[in-house]
Image (cartoon, rainbow, N blue to C red):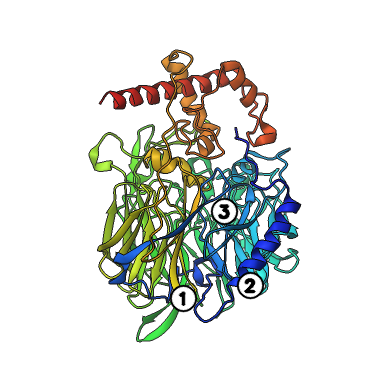
Amino acid sequence: MTKDWKPAMASRSRARRLAVVLLAAACSSNARGPADSDWELLGNSSEMQHHSALDGIDRTSVARLGLAWATDMPTLDGMVGNPLVKNGVIFQSGALGRIYANDVRTGKLLWSFEPEHDFTGRSFVGYWGSRINRGVALWNDLVIASAGDCRLNAVEQMTGKLRWVAQPCDSEDAYAITAAPRVGGDLIFTGNACGDSGATRGYVDALDARTGERRWRFYTVPGDPARPQDSDLHEMTARTWGTGWYSKTKGCGSVWDAITYDPVLKQLYIGVGGPAPMNPAQRAPDAGDELFTSSVVALNAETGEYRWHFKQVPNDGWNYDASVGLMVAELPLGGTPRRVVISVPKNGFAYVLDAASGEFVSGGAYTAMNWAKGLDAKGRPVFDPAARYWQQGRGRTVVLPSPIGAHGWEAIAFSPAERLVYIPTMVIPAAIESRPESRVEVDYYYGSSGDSAWNAYGELVAWDPLSGSVRWRRRHPLPVNGGLLHTAGGLVFQGTASGELEALDAATGALLWSRPVGGSIRAAPSTVLAEGEQLILVATGSGSSAATASWLSKYSSAGRRWTQARLLAFKLDGTAAIPEDGSLTLVPEPSEPRMERALVARGRVLFEANECHACHGLSGDAVHGAIPNLLTAPPPSFEAFQSIVQDGALAVRGMPQFPLADEDVRALYAFVIESGWNAYEAQRGSEER
């Protein structure tokens, strides 16, 4: 279910003509000089360290930081990508693959690009992925972003005119591209997401940056074992999946985010997602490492040839994939500098690997966990049998981290001076119940199980890769917060779900500065010099361009998540007014009474089984954006609900058709009505207080 959204300009051709005039004027009035700088690459370098050498804003001067400007973006969905900056222009992308260019001095929108969309024939993953977008890549005069399905669009940085389109995957299968592309040399690197479906085979593509044509492809998992594999490598990996595995899963192994290019060793490091289905009881009983899922893999960046891999979670049953948190750094190990890969996956451990060989150098826990007791000398986990829920019968097992992970796609950062890795951390326990006979593989009970010992919260953690220990922690009341920026001024910047931008002392974790920004923050800030002044740039809003946006419906205040998508710039002695929070949308009294408890319970199961929560939130309470909140904008009647869900009345607008039985649609409707009553009565209770 989607809302209409129309660009501010009447036509794309008119928008492009205006863009040329505006951008030419901006460039002519702002000739670049030594007082200007860029942030051209995701994380500000190929190594993905999210570090800046700028130090004009430091521990002493940060108290003077104020808003320079704020601009509303023409989208209903809050953006989550790291803003890139080149030649005085800020580039961002959002839902449905829209691309935006703004003047760095004023925030003025210079142009926007909206790709064509046809939802006909898409898989559910293709529908879901159309709303997810985590940023852009810049190469020469192009800006490149996913269209949200399986296309990459390359448009001209000056005008937003389309240069080429590539389609590395097919959204009619269970594929979508949701991450920012990566750049290395004259290649664009991209993976894809399978939606944890297990219906497809994961891979990474390298595309010619000039044309979008494919140069090479690397598959992360083997193919059909009944046929010859496409390489000797996968003749080996196929033996790690156990007996009869292909009848249960095609592997998945998505590289849905983490890709890092190493310009020194000319290698590409990829973090591979976990095997699917998540429950090992539904995969081969004698499976081994199921390569290369839940692993870091190094490839020859020019050819895609396999170099090495490091397995993090054998027999992964918790969705602890490695497709997040990869960076490259130089560390003094054994008395000499050593090039290493630092991996901060979802499982709660951080790893240091030799970049040339993949050898495990060191590692350690950066957060609380109960699935493993530690790492052995080779970096393999020492499992705690109590967390293996699939071996516990029908009892619930509380697991930490939960399948959402201790760390997600949000940017980690590195301090070359302090030699610390900064990690945005989520502490969200989950009670998991294995139900092999159900369409729901695992039931999740995120947040609190009723025991205060399992309450959810967030942390910003400074982890020492030399000692494998935590240097300091700063606790947040809400678990789902933004990515990080480290500067040579000795600061770490982070935005929060509750709508503040904070600056912390990088050495101690002390809070030095904080300002409300009128919206939740999931993006990592960037920093550049513009006309001699250091700017801190950050995107705010609902965060609804991220797959985990539904968590904001549970873990943020409504006023902060129901806000206009904005781009903000801070500078020393800035005096602009901070934007206000969004207005609260009230939950109307449901049009029908609560229904039978058994029907509601069945609807709750079906809501998760059919992945309704992936778009509409955990209880239908989606964050503000193009996806409607089913509590504040409920279906007007069962007949309307049935037409949308069962008949596909809104399929052309991005709401897929679900061929469900009548009784299943009725159960889903009962759950939505029940959730509406719960929210309405909670709202009334709050008003009475």
Pick whichever of labels 2 and 1 is earlier in the sequence. 2
Query: Mark 3 and mark 2: span between their CA atoms?
Result: 48 Å
Quarter of the figure that contains the N terminus: top right
Quarter of the figure that contains the C terminus: top left
Between disc 1 and disc 3, the foreground one is: 1
> Crowding at label 3, few (<14), some or many (≥20) Cα neighbours within 10 Å?
many
> Crowding at label 1, few (<14), some or many (≥20) Cα neighbours within 10 Å?
few
Tell me which residue sits at (68%, 73%) in the image: 186
Residue 602 vs residue 6, the one in the foreground: 6
Amino acid marked by disc 1? Gly
Tell me which residue sits at (52%, 57%) in the image: 81
Residue 607 vs residue 13, the one in the foreground: 13
| Disc 3 target residue | 253
Q: Residue 503 location, x and y as percent?
A: 33, 62
Residue 12 vs residue 344, the one in the foreground: 12
Query: Mark 2 and mark 1: span between their CA atoms?
Result: 17 Å
Amino acid marked by disc 2? Ser
Q: Residue 51 location, x and y as percent?
A: 43, 71
Task: Locate residue 482 relative to residue 288 in the image: left or right.
Answer: left
| Disc 1 target residue | 532
Amino acid marked by disc 3? Gly
Task: Locate residue 105 relative to residue 497 in the image: left or right.
Answer: right
Residue 28: numbered disc: 2
The image shows residue 186, relative to residue 272, as above or below, that is below
The image shows residue 439, relative to residue 329, as above or below, that is above
The image quadrant that residue 234 belongs to is bottom right
Task: Locate residue 115 relative to residue 48 in the image: left or right.
Answer: right
Tell me which residue sits at (63%, 64%) in the image: 189
